[in-house]
Image (spheres, coloured by chain):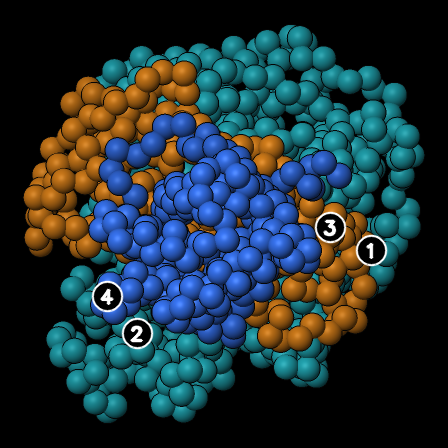
Amino acid sequence: MNKILFSAVSKKFVMALAGLFLLIFLPVHLGINLMLLRGDPEPFNNAAHFMATFPLVKVVEILLFLAIIVHIAYGLLLQVQNWMSRPVGYSVRNKSETSAFSRFMIWTGGSVLIFLVIHFFNFYFIKLGIVEGDPENFYSVAYQLFNIPGYVILYWVCFLVLGFHLYHALQSAFQTLGLSNEFWTPLIKVISLLYAIAIPVGFAIIPLVIWLIK
Amino acid sequence: MVTLNSKIPEGPLEEKWTKYKANARRVNPANKKKLDIIVVGTGISGAPAASALGELGYNVKVFCYQDTPRRAHSVAAQGGINAAKNYKNDGDSVYQLFYDIIKGGDFRAREANVYRIAEVSNQIIDHFTAIGVPFAREYGGTLTTRSFGGVQVSRTFYSRGQTGQQVLLGAYSSLSRQVKEGTVTMYPRRDMLDLVVVDGKARGIIARNLVTGAIERHSAHAVVLATGGYGTIYYLSTLAVNSNASAAWKAYKKGALFANPSFVQIHPSSVPQMNEFQSKLTLMSESLRNDGRVWVPKNKGDKRPANEIPEEDRDYYLERRYPAFGNLVPRDVASRAAKERCDAGYGVGPTGLAVNLDFRDAIKKQGKKAIEAKYGNLFEMYKDITGIDSYEEPMRIYPAGHYTMGGLWVDYELMTTIPGLFAIGEANFSDHGANRLGASSLMQGAGDGYFILPYTITNFLAPEIRTPRIKTDLPEFDEAEKNAVENINRLMSVGGTETASSFHKRLGKIMWDHCGMSRNEQGLLEARRMIRELREEFWKELKVPGKTDEVNQELEKAIRMADFLELGELMVLDALNRKESCGAHFREESQTPDGEAQRIDEQYAYVAAWEYNGENEPVLNREPLNFEFVELKQRSYK
Amino acid sequence: MQNMKLKLKIWKQRDASSRGRFVTYDLDGVSPEMSFVEMLAYLNEKLVLKGDEPVTFEHDCHEGICGSCGMYINGYPHGPVKGLTTCLLSMRYFKDGETIVIEPWRAKSFPVIKDLMVDRSAFDKIQQAGGFISVAVGAAPEANTIPVRKHSSDLAFDASVCIGCGACVAACKNASAMLFVSAKVSQYALLPQGRPEAKERVRDMIAEMDKQGFGSCSNTGACEAQCPKQIKLFNIARLNREYIKAL
């Protein structure tokens, strides 16, 4: 039984499921963020408050953290296995044709993780009381951050990288879960592309619009 | 001289095998575990034999020179596998299949053996289907067949142009299952260097580990050779470049008789030789002749591109000479006809040693899609090799050495003249007479391995149940190992200036020119002299680099080459002895007025089984062929 | 006939425990009609006559079906042309004066035996773990007893053409054997004959694949791109599906 639960294929399933769960969370987060553009702190802060206090959301939040941890932990475990499976590399770089960005998932994933940590320091840890700030007014926290040009550039770069990660992630999850075939896969690839563009662009335009309005 | 007892059971043809099985001795399951069997070779006879014997409970040890059993050259068989299922309702039957093989072999095979292989043919298809071989199917979900050269029914089961691969991988999967079960132990990357005979019985082999160079001793109660044919003696052939005759040759030198060594099938359709460095001719399946039309220009030296030669200037010589069978005449007939046209100066291509195989009319009639579905992979392969697109212009083909009907002499039980030594598949001589019909080799190999040997081997093994495991420290093992090591040392120490491959090329040319598609007395005598000279030169001029205790591919080639140089002479001797033409063996002195093979039944209706006689000329033993059930006729495909 | 001159940079390694290195050979007189392995045989002929050590590499059928040959040529398993094994790779795809770097398959599960020859017995082990249908000789029903949908049979065939050469492992950045395993699992999963032991098969083969030290699948598709038999990535999806069903 252990062999089945901890085989490489099982690890990939768990990673894919966790990843898909995170993919559902992203549009929700984006939807709330877009309230920043309403020009009024009230709706955004209300939404943030709701997310921080509603019991069901609390449960989902635990699941979310679990998904993040599992996704990362399994990703690392598999990566180590993968590195170990070729102790001596090639001297000529492998030129085999591959799916875009699929070779760099560990690096794009790692970059997203770094952003996540920064993001936690900026918001989530305020909520937990680890970092100083007003958890009831994330609206102004966000506006302050978006006023720092360096932060915005980092923010954009991270979402670009997230886009790379998402593009392969979505179609790959379907493949891992055994859901791709000659008929659906072309469609899944298009959806992956649209998703990988829509989400990062959605996040990225927020500081841009704020700047333009100003 | 030895007394040849073919052990053919008495009785009517269709009851012989049933009767034999009913009377065969049995080995109790508990005793089977105590009996060791060595199987050398993992092709379409060796892998089935090893897995079937493993399933029965014997302790089986399997050897192959490749890194894994799945690479045996049966994997390259393209066209299909015959069976008398009569799924097409075209009047096929076991008897019809039997008759076609006997006739195709030009009445030089044993009736009882041939009938038996036809009998088990249906079981082979059942078994392969059950173990997951994806044979081609109809839309209704049933199996489909196609027709093949030399017959007028459609009985060939196939998996696109890769039937050999599919059935071999099927057999390999069963073998893998037995390895897991623990009944079979695999010894890959081993070359068999010698057979060990103890008290007159085959009791083991000496093998060289091709990775470490170690010389190993392996013992068993019986040894099965499934080592294939020796067509690579021509250097350029359709066989894998490492295929070799050494195992069978060593058995011959230990006392097994070698039957009909000169019966070699030259396949009519291979990709012609393109350069002098080529080491292999690639086969283009005979099934192509179902839809392709063979032709050469009507005018000598017509150098126009094929597509520019109008209909009236084309000579569809097979359709012209053989209206009844047309392009589907047997292989020997098609090969000789191609050679005849090329020798007469009508050949095409840069060398003039090729004929056209044209799909223009078939594509016009059935559409490109239909042709692609049937032969897509073959067209692709042809394009990969030549750069020519056969959908647009004709393929060029030429005959190439392909299959050896000759092989170790075996009786009805597939046992050689050495008790306990069995030979199955292409390694034996038994079923194809002087010419093999297409899609019969997979059938014979798998039939021998799955359904015949497991029954017949018990007659030998039943009295052996009290024989304890054979020890490998017997003096016979010492002796065989010593000889093998000495042979290797001798090869290493020649210290000349020519590689084994170079000698192989030279021997191949001698064999092809004088003991190939057509033979005559003068040429054969000349060939014998040339082979002897070449052999002398080999032992003076050979160069083998490297050491013996490591991977040394040049040494492997040299060991095999030394045997080819001896076998070549035996082939020539056999061809000299048989002054008739039959099947693939075409003696120019014996032909009909219109140039077809002329048998001389009164003098040559026998199997020529050669016995090793040291430095002296081999001794000819004759096994008369008695045809009780069919009437000997001059073969006609007109 | 055209003559080509090549610079060959070939990996030479005495045995599994020795350190290897690249050796450069200048080779003149190569014909564009040669296949890649014929070119190497030609090199070896010259080396032997010169008294040098020839290059050890595997090749047998020369028609792309036995799976013996396989080397990593200029960054591509089996070379830069799609759908070809090394033995069918014609030299006309290379340019006169070109430098060609030839390396063995690189994977922990495929240790180098000598030069370009590697040990691929890990594939046999995977096959032995479950790559079969357990029907004993003599036990098979009449072949047409179980009708098989033509479409399924064709898909099974497409998967079954795998030649076990290991190019998928060589191409994969993770040295994963998923394409190889999926081809075998798919063949049997698609046929009704293979269903009875489908669960055990996929579990056992995956377990053995891990045990042999292959990497996991990142769905990069390099295997599919380099497979000389063009086995599809969808087979891996099917393998995953079968595995979920077997949980």
- Which secondary structure, mark 3? loop
Q: Which chain has been coloured cyan in this picture?
A: B
Query: Residue C186 or B78: which is nearer the viewer?
Result: C186
Q: Which chain has been coloured orange in this picture?
A: C
Circle 4 is placed at which residue position? A214
Please give left or right for residue C104 compared with residue B249 in the image. left
Residue contact at pointers 4 and 1, CB within 8 angstroms = no
Q: Amino acid at mark 1?
A: Ala
Q: For residue B533, which quarter of the picture?
A: top left
User: Which one is earlier in the sequence, the residue at label 1 or at label 3?
Assistant: 1
Circle 3 is placed at which residue position? C247
- Which secondary structure, mark 1? loop
Where residue B337 appears, as percent x and y from the top left, is: 36, 70
- What residue is drawn where x is 32% and y is 50%? A145
Where residue B119 appears, as percent x and y from the top left, is: 75, 62
Give neighbour class at mark 3: few <14, some 14-19, many 20+ (Cα, 10 Å). Answer: few
Circle 1 is placed at which residue position? C139
What chain does mark 3 sit on?
Answer: C
Where residue C120 appears, as percent x and y from the top left, is: 49, 35
C-alpha gap between disc 4 and disc 3: 57 Å
